[in-house]
Amino acid sequence: MGKQQQTLIEQGFPFDQLSAIAEQESWRKEVNRPASYIHKWWARRLGSVFRGLIIGGFETPDADFFEKYYGNTSYQGKVVFDPFMGSGTTVHEAIKLGAKAIGSDINPVAAAIVRAAADTYTRDEVVQAFKQIESNCRDQIQKYYSTYYQGEKVDVLYYFWTKEVVCDDCSTKIPLTRSSVFSKNAYASKKPEAKSLCPHCGHINSILYNDSDTECEKCRKHYNPQNGNVYGIDYVCPVCGKRERVVDYMRRKGTVPTERMYAKMVIDHHGKKHYVDIEDSDLQLYAEAQVALAEYEAYIPSDEIHAGINTNQILNYQYTHWREMFNSRQLLAFGILSKEIASISDIRLRRLFAVLMSGTLEFNNMFCSFKGEGTGAVRPLFYNHILKNELMPLEANPWGCKASSGSFSTLFETRILRMLEYKDHPFELKAVPGGKSEKVYLDKSRDAAAVVTSEELWCESNAIVLCKDSAHTTIPDESVDLVVTDPPFFDNVNYSELADFFYVWLKKFDIGVGDDNSDSTRVSGEVQDNVPDRFASKLCDVFKECHRVLSPSGLLIFTYHHSRAEGWVSVYDAICGAGFSISQVVPIKAEMAVSVAIMAANEPINYDLVFICRKRPEYEQTKLPVGNDEYYREGLKRLEESGLKVSRGDKMIFKYGLSLKQLSDSGVQAITKDDIERIAQALEPDV
Ligand SMILES: C[S@@+](CC[C@H](N)C(=O)[O-])C[C@H]1O[C@@H](n2cnc3c(N)ncnc32)[C@H](O)[C@@H]1O
Ligand SMILES: [Zn+2]
Ligand SMILES: [Zn+2]
């Protein structure tokens, strides 16, 4: 077979300018790409990058990339496949570009999210369905989040809780507080007013955030607000001084910690917030919620938490069932919502609201905490991509009231309504001088399709969203033009362990998410392994399937980064083992501008590397027009000139990628870490 025509992504791809656009998107991803933000998923990619990759994969090097990018470009008749769909970044971009999109994810939670977001709705039907839920659920839930303040009935925005242990030596009840200051402003040095809890009588005192001596307004005793009963991972009894690791206490007792409500925040009719002590009526109301829960038990998950890398973090604290991550009142609220949503007969709408409710769970459980004033108050469960025990949980108002965040009604507005608006009027960002951006609307484009959930219906629809191990699909041979994807990065995120938190609720809605018999989304085909060979072989199985379904001239395009050479050997093994060779590599702006995971890494990584692969037998090797080192220097220069920060970690990614390309060019099948490092080192010996 003769030499195939190169594509724009292989030659002359404007990765520097696209990275600058992606950077703009990354500042407000949920506003700029709302359709992939209707529910939590981990390590989401930037839509602008994937739009660019699809365009680059379809166009030839002489095309005007930005004319296509901002124009009403349509690839009708073309098929784009993403075997690691996640939150559906590729699926949405392919639909917007008029192609037939096939997305597949082994995890049913991901499949539910993408099916809900890609489908077609009228705004009216969605708003009607919401109103129905509102009229049947709001008052029922709000009843348990209300109190009297200065004689008026008001909504409670938050209840503040602390976990407690009882000293074995002197029987003192010890609240597990790190300090008695439980609320301060996120910018405390500018707004120093704070609240602290009197350790003697439990009264809430107004203090300055850094006070070290306070007289309680109620009991008149003095205390140091900075002191708490938890030091590092130990608690210390304030009476007898007994010290022990919190986790050891839980293990000895064999039960989850007890929890105590110690304060609440109410909002008055003028929209002003007040911190108020817990009164008997609050305890009474909570007790009523515990009783009312019995009626909704059928909607509450009873599934166990299975051992795993992330789940062990909470199993150690004796949480054994997912429902224990919520208090009874939160379970009641979700029971009320679940019952109502389960009764929606149209599966599209049922799925949409089930996904909305599932997303609300993340902000309304006893692993959430208070971020403080002056910022989006609730720190959600997955803030850190892990399951972290929380000693001072924040119980937010699940239905929501004025000033709520993360509630069912506020997320309806910020997630669902915003998504509907975007689906009808999608836009792209254009970088303008001053580090800003403006929106360019794509008049003829829509981010909506009739979603089908099985490849049997393959001919009729332009969005097929599968819940499958992508190593085994029934997509016909050679029927796909482009695979654009983002595989799991080695052992980076334990998707299924984390997704189970949502899954146990979602599976009850009869929306094609697993079945009641399975209590976990963990399955053996998931590409996730901390053993390099096993990771490589599972990734290779999916790439083999991509090879089978791709047309002879089709490209496999995927993003990747890893901080260790092992991660790159694995990816090379998978590419070669599946019958591909690397035709080009380009750096591109990664996931987030500010990321907890990235900030914590030794070498911050702001870029992904994009691999462009072709089927090996059909592909007559085209060498780079310039040598590897020239391509490397030129690439770095372009990124630096576009004003984006390029760290040592980013340079390493680029060099590792180029090493793989060089090895692939020379036809080597099996490589070692040393091969990669030798070539990478030669590219820039002094780094
Ligand atoms: C890095 S994420 C993709 C994220 C996605 N690009 C986004 O923007 O949300 C990788 C995904 O691959 C999925 N996955 C892992 N193994 C799989 C397999 N064998 N078949 C299909 N999906 C798989 C995981 O569940 C996860 O959602
Ligand atoms: Zn006091
Ligand atoms: Zn004691």
Image (tube, rainbow, N blue to C red):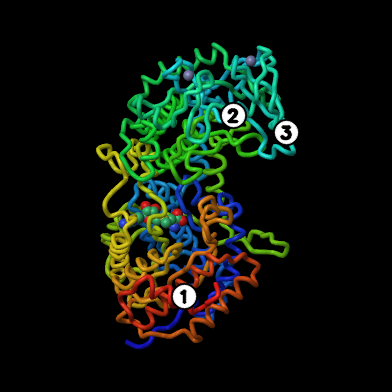
Q: In the rendered image, which residue does mark 1 sit on? A: 680
Up/down of 675 relative to 181, above or below: below
User: Which is closer to the viewer, label 3 or label 1?
Assistant: 1
Quadrant position of residue 202: top right
- As drawn, the residue found furthest toward the right would be 190
The answer to the question of whether label 3 and label 1 lie on touching residues, with beta carbons closer than 8 A, is no
User: Callout 1: helix, strand or loop?
Assistant: helix
**Distance from Cα at disc 3 to Cα at disc 1:** 51 Å
User: Callout 3: helix, strand or loop?
Assistant: loop
Q: Report the residue at 61% width, 39% height from top.
A: 376
Q: Report the residue at 60% width, 52% height from top.
A: 28
Q: Position of residue 42 (x, y in %)?
A: 45, 50
The answer to whether residue 337 is seen in the rendering is no
Q: Amino acid at mark 1?
A: Ala
Q: Position of residue 248 (x, y in %)?
A: 39, 31
Residue 210 appears left or right of 452: right
User: Callout 2: helix, strand or loop?
Assistant: loop
Reading the chain from its start, which is encountered first: label 3 or label 1? 3
Q: In the rendered image, which residue does mark 3 sit on? A: 192
Q: Position of residue 455 (x, y in %)?
A: 30, 58
Q: Report the residue at 41% width, 85% height from top.
A: 622
Ligand 2: give its quadrant. top right
Reading the chain from its start, which is encountered first: label 2 or label 3? 2
User: Which is closer to the viewer, label 2 or label 3?
Assistant: 2
Q: Who is closer to the viewer here, 415 or 72?
A: 415
The numbered dot on residue 179 is: 2
The answer to the question of whether label 2 and label 3 lie on touching residues, with beta carbons closer than 8 A, is no
Up/down of 516 relative to 283, above or below: below
Position of the N terminus, as image quadrant, is bottom left
